[in-house]
Amino acid sequence: MPTPSRLWVIDDDRAVRFVLAEALRDAGYAVSAFEGAKQALAALADEPAPDLVFTDVRMPEMDGLAFLDALKAKRPDLPVIVMSAYTDVASTAGAFRGGAHEFLSKPFDLDEAVALAERALPQRDVTPPATAPEISNELLGDSPAMRELFRAIGRLAQAPLGVLITGETGTGKELVARALHRESPRARKPFVALNTAAIPAELLESELFGHEAGAFTGANKRHVGRFEQADGGTLFLDEIGDMPAALQTRLLRVLAEGEFFRVGGRELIKVDVRVIAATHQDLEARVRDGSFRADLLHRLDVVRLQLPPLRDRKGDVPALAARFLAQAAKKLGATAKRFHPESLKRLQQHDWPGNVRELENLCWRLAALAPGEAITPRDLGNALRGGGTNDPGDWTRPLAQAVREALARGDTTLHATLREKFDQVLLETALDHTEGHRQLAAEKLGLGRNTVTRKLGTVRGRNKS
Ligand SMILES: Nc1ncnc2c1ncn2[C@@H]1O[C@H](COP(=O)(O)OP(=O)(O)OP(=O)(O)O)[C@@H](O)[C@H]1O
């Protein structure tokens, strides 16, 4: 499996940064995002250079063109895409003079940005969404529940039945869907995944069914939807419980008839797609409260696969941990570490609310940060969530100091700016922790998803206008 190209996104606007990084990740790239050019330059000293960079121009500390100069001095061949809302000749010419590969004017279409990335990465091993990097992960597990699951996958892969995969977040629902596809007669055709919760409701319909040029403001070229992309193969609809009511109705019709119109289109599109849906929600409860259609549930839920949470199969923890440490070492080009037996015991005592994903993230952090070859309980104490020191005094003291200084300067907007900063740190850290997964970030912060979306700003809308 080729390693995905590594992309950097640098923008001080957190919303742009987030949606662009997310779109590029969806396209199969490994993406790191930075809020400023300085942070990106600092990262260049510590980690291998990326394959492609997207950078904004106007940023507070160091502007994108100065960054471009600094970057080109170190890496003359690295392609850089410069993004800006200022498309005057001076800015664009400045960018190209500085060696920019492309100029992307804001607001831009995310598809356009992804297409640009594709073109800017010549002769790379193309990793379309159908073979995103996670696929190299084989499902691992020796517990009775997992063995039963593997048998079910073997049986179900051959049958053209709808499958509903349920289980808490991070339990491996997507991995199971990929395995079902890989073992099926459709294996040579695409596997296309779409996370319903990650896409704003107003864009979801065109994401699923495509649109014709001019179908709505911002639709300047034809877009082929995920259903068409998955023709002959499998469409994985994650977080199906979050699908808006109108779209549930449309999806039901398409599933029943196997044909549809693109948004704004007249041509009837016929597809042969196996739909596998997943959810961490209790869909029966959603049917009862009227937010999910019973007939859609029945159509999707021909066979149900229930994934057990990691806390119910802690026997699988050591093998998973060893696998993740080995994978991380390989990616980081370092010698593999191992867990000290005492550390393994602690791992098995932990409750794993984020399931396998939480364990995987922990292993990656430890592979990078633990000082010795054997990971000690002390290393774990620092890395395991809930095991570290969480004294609120840690951050209130510097905050009080900053407030004192700002008051001394005569600042009168302190509450608004600090509150915004507070939200920003909270949201970005949570999104980073959940790898950009909004619903999960909202849950972890004890907020509603809508609140998180509102706080993040409606940048997609802004982008399209
Ligand atoms: N049994 C397993 N063996 C190996 N890796 C696993 C297993 N289960 C999950 N993983 C890894 O854990 C991570 C999370 O898995 P995945 O994305 O499939 O979870 P999910 O249930 O779809 O999560 P969400 O509901 O948040 O979308 C992935 O990197 C996946 O490779």
Image (tube, grey):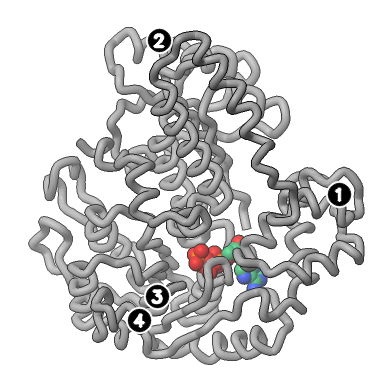
Quadrant location of residue 196? bottom left
- 243 in relation to 35, above or below: below
Q: Earlier in the sequence, mark 2 or mark 3?
A: 2
Between residues 66 and 402, which one lies in front from this camera angle? 402
Residue located beneath label 4 in the image = 285
**Which disc number belongs to residue 277?**
3
Q: Earlier in the sequence, mark 3 or mark 1?
A: 3
Q: Position of residue 22 (x, y in %)?
A: 44, 47
- 449 in relation to 306, above or below: above
CA gap between label 1 and label 2 equals 44 Å
Q: Which residue is at 60% across, 90% downward?
A: 151
Q: Residues within 10 Å of mark 3 (few under 14, many from 20)?
A: many
Q: Earlier in the sequence, mark 4 or mark 1?
A: 4
Q: Is residue 372 left or right of residue 31?
A: right
Amino acid at the residue labelled 4? Ala
Q: Residues within 10 Å of mark 1 (few under 14, many from 20)?
A: few
Q: Secondary structure at mark 1?
A: loop
CA gap between label 4 and label 1 equals 48 Å
Q: Are marks 3 and 1 in contact (CB under 8 Å)?
A: no
Residue located beneath label 1 in the image = 335
Q: Is residue 220 left or right of residue 146?
A: left
CA gap between label 3 and label 1 equals 39 Å
Q: Position of residue 359 (x, y in %)?
A: 69, 62
Q: In the image, which is nearer the foreground, mark 4 or mark 1?
A: 4
Quadrant location of residue 137? bottom right
Residue located beneath label 2 in the image = 94
Q: Which residue is at 48% across, 56% downward?
A: 446
